Image (cartoon, rainbow, N blue to C red):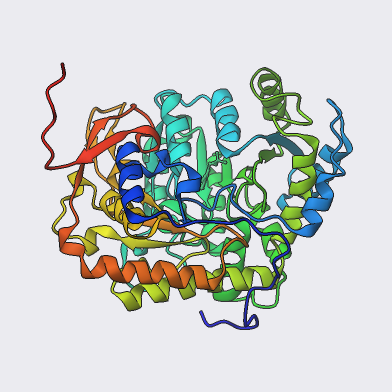
Amino acid sequence: MKRTRQPAEPYRIKSVEPIKLLPRHLREEKIIQANYNVFKLDAPDIYIDLLTDSGTSAMSIKQWAALMLGDESYAGSTSFRNFERVVKDIFRKEYVIPCHQGRAAEHLLFSVLDTKGKYVLNNTHFDTTKGNTQHKQGIPVDFPCAESMSAEPLPFKGNMDIEKFEQFVAEHGAGKIPLVLMTITNNSVGGQPVSMKNIKEVSEICYRNKLPFFIDSARFAENCFFIKKNEAGYAQKPIKEIAQELFKQCDGVLMSAKKDGLANIGGFLALNDEKLYQQLTELMVIIEGFPTYGGLAGRDMEILAVGLEEVLDYDYLDFRVDQVRYFGEKLIEKGMPIVEPTGGNAVFIDAGKFLPHIPAEQFPGQSLAVEFYREGGIRSAEIGSLMLGGIDPNTGENLMAARELVRLALPRRVYTNSHFDYVAEVADRIVSNKEHLKGYKIKRAPEILRHFTCDLQPAEAVMSPVG
Ligand SMILES: Cc1ncc(COP(=O)(O)O)c(C=O)c1O
């Protein structure tokens, strides 16, 4: 997509945060100390942090001002009412439950649904949604569309495979499916958007089969921007109206507001079912907090009330999506294969293709992520078999990811294009040296969400005897 209106960042910088590139020998030391797991690096040791776009946004002047308006009353604060009003307006739901972040909303929902031995269907589960499903003995099943794996730059690769989804529903029946989710944009297949048509088709199947349909809406505004740009009939519609139309299709919304809430913390559940709302709020008093704050401070809710409106601004979204495209094209120029087209929040490098000499069992994505840090102090995230694979707790099977990706996520309103030019220079150096990159193996890992905390070691290293 060509840049349409913004020749440069649609904001100027009012407050600065210094960053520093450590010398190479220190970066080598730090990554060894972190057991080759970039999640274990300390932030001051990183020059450009592209680990995630979650909770890393820069706030606007209006959000900083809103912070001072935070009403910290335990119950019924004006901050909650402001937050609730904005959420109801955009997401078109009757009940709003604030949560401290997305996975807390997932935890709450999965705690009241009967998922044991049953299927939770999704276009593609994000890792915490998958983790929460499995934690309650549910079976996550993904239906990414066939195009999601295509090399063609198609517009809606995040879609659900409608035929396979419908077939599964027909085979297993509503009694075995307590929840259908759609993740927009579809993070685990490269941040690819989902079309309105696809959402409406899923919604219709759910309605016909009496299946509860929720949308995991962490990046809803970015998804709506792609609908506006690439789906017939939406070019003239404001982003907010597209969002309202989209959310009318579902029974409920789960949101990690650390993304398109333009905030550093926060999330929510929004839904229409009064009985479910009662169950959720009864439980949340025990695990998250009183229903009008749900683990958030009043100031956090004020910030979100502003952020959820600001994120719908066309100029902001136009620049953001274009910055991702700009960065992706730079990486392609340097010789790194990426998932195309670029999505709304990150560039995904296909490390499996880039490093064919490293087998998937040795995590080529992790190898590239480690090299980005070593070579340029850049932090990225493996989204391959380290994150998505592992032993299936239900079947005991050793799972591998469909692709070995590395995600370079773009924090919102944080880095300028010259930061991305620097990352592309580092990529260039990695490309010239790629045959020397080695695989890794796991030294120690937890059962669920292992990538966050596991320890790794170079695959060919000999373990020293344990004394
Ligand atoms: C699609 C999606 N759902 C849920 C989550 C979990 O949200 P949180 O990190 O706020 O717990 C994330 C986080 O990255 C996400 O991308």
Identify which residue, 432 or 335, lies in the foreground: 432
Residue 3 position in % (x across, y down):
57, 81
127 displayed left or right of 232: left
Identify which residue, 175 or 297, lies in the foreground: 297
Q: Residue 271: name its quadrant.
A: top right
Q: Residue 406: name its quadrant.
A: bottom left
65 displayed left or right of 229: right
Q: In the rendered image of this protein, does residue 172 appear above or below residue 208?
A: above
393 displayed left or right of 6: left
Q: Residue 81: name its quadrant.
A: top right
Count of picture labels: 0
Identify which residue, 150 or 58, lies in the foreground: 58
Residue 18 position in % (x across, y down):
59, 56
Residue 380 position in % (x across, y down):
40, 53
Q: In the rendered image of this protein, does residue 371 appear above or below residue 272?
A: below
The residue positioned 58% from the left and 39% from the top of the image is: 102
Residue 303 position in % (x across, y down):
76, 48
The residue positioned 56% from the left and 52% from the top of the image is: 204
Can I make out residue 409 in this image? Answer: yes
- Quadrant where the C terminus is found in the figure: top left
The residue positioned 87% from the left and 30% from the top of the image is: 76
Can I make out residue 383 in this image? Answer: no
